[in-house]
Amino acid sequence: MAENVVQLEDISRVYEMGEEPLYALKKLTLSIEDGDYVAIMGTSGSGKSTLMNLIGCLDRATEGRYLLNQKDVFDLTDDELAEIRNSTIGFVFQQFNLLSSMTAIENVMLPLVYAGVDKEQRTLRAQFVLQQVGLDQRIYHRPNQLSGGQQQRVSIARAIVNKPRILLADEPTGALDSHTATEILELFDDLVEQGITVILVTHDGEVANRASRIVRMRDGQITSDSRIRSKKNA
Ligand SMILES: Nc1ncnc2c1ncn2[C@@H]1O[C@H](COP(=O)(O)OP(=O)(O)OP(=O)(O)O)[C@@H](O)[C@H]1O
Ligand SMILES: [Mg+2]
């Protein structure tokens, strides 16, 4: 059996706002196997982004245990957490989050700058992943010279340039028309084929149906968890 890359045990994330503490996540337990493709659904405010931020080590749980690649991340310093994040996790967001003053290839190379990769290798890796997402003809364009779908391809290239084990995508197709969304989802299929664990948040049932497992949330808890097809690389 494949090992768990994500193992959350009784995780709560509490925001102290006003009188009552707000439980964005409430004693949530969830394990995700290496190579799986998981869609997370749920109404607005149910805790999906909070969950993604925790899985991606952008945020810390208030209580509970989180094993990322079998390693307990609770006692890590912020620097250690950032190091793990850069080496194991790629992020894709609804609004692309590209730096507008930089070209596509500069945006994609950025994580490699932080990782201390030399310039020649950075360029080669960035060109390779931009080709992988079908954007090799646009590498010197800036975000405002690209369509939404092309910008999302750049952000996917940026997310995978460090060869992450896990790709987290929060509403990656939310800002795209359905044709472009399908193209982006085909890219995710390719990444799953390559063995990357993909976890995506969506409001769209059709998008979720492309995953292998659908987790539904409400009020910071999981209300259903169903495998709709076997893992691609099982
Ligand atoms: N920084 C914060 N401070 C206080 N409360 C927060 C903060 N971030 C999120 N919350 C609250 O936590 C709950 C979960 O928010 P979250 O963003 O995870 O929801 P979501 O499921 O991603 O919603 P959406 O579908 O609208 O993106 C909400 O009630 C939200 O108001
Ligand atoms: Mg959200």
Image: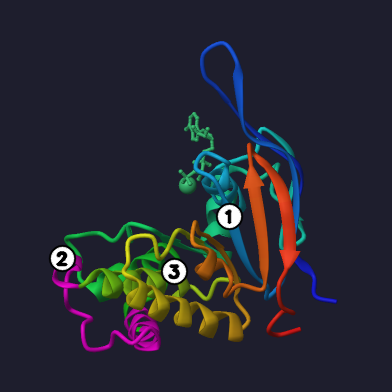
Stretch in magenta: 121-146
Residue 65 x/y as whole percent: 76, 44
| Mark seen at residue 118 | none
3 or 1: mark nearer the eye: 1
For marks 1 and 2, give the CA distance.
30 Å
Residue 30, relative to residue 213: is it above or below? above
Q: Nearer the viewer, mark 1 or mark 2?
A: 1
Quadrant of the image occupied by residue 120: bottom left
Q: Which mark is residue 144?
A: 2
Q: Label 1, on which residue? A: 41
Q: Tell me the kind of residue under disc 2.
A: Asn
Q: Is mark 2 within 8 Å of ligand 2?
A: no
Q: Identify the element where label 3 is drawn.
A: helix
Q: What's under tag 3, amino acid-wise?
A: Ala
Mark before the other along the chain sequence, 2 or 3:
2
- Which residue, given by chain and number where applicable, does mark 3 sit on? 159
Residue at 61% from the left image edge and 40% from the top image edge: 60
Side (left or right) of 78 relative to 185: right
Identify which amino acid the numbered label 1 is placed on.
Met
What x and y, as percent, mark residue 78?
55, 43
Q: Identify the secondary structure beneath mark 2.
A: helix
Disc 1: CA contacts within 10 A as few (<14), some (14-19) or many (>=20):
many
Q: Image check: 193 left or right of 170?
A: right
Please give the name of the residue rendered at 17% of the width and 70% of the height, measured from the top-left corner. 142
Tell me, yes or no, whether the highlighted magenta stretch contains residue 131.
yes
Marks 2 and 1: in contact by CB < 8 Å?
Answer: no
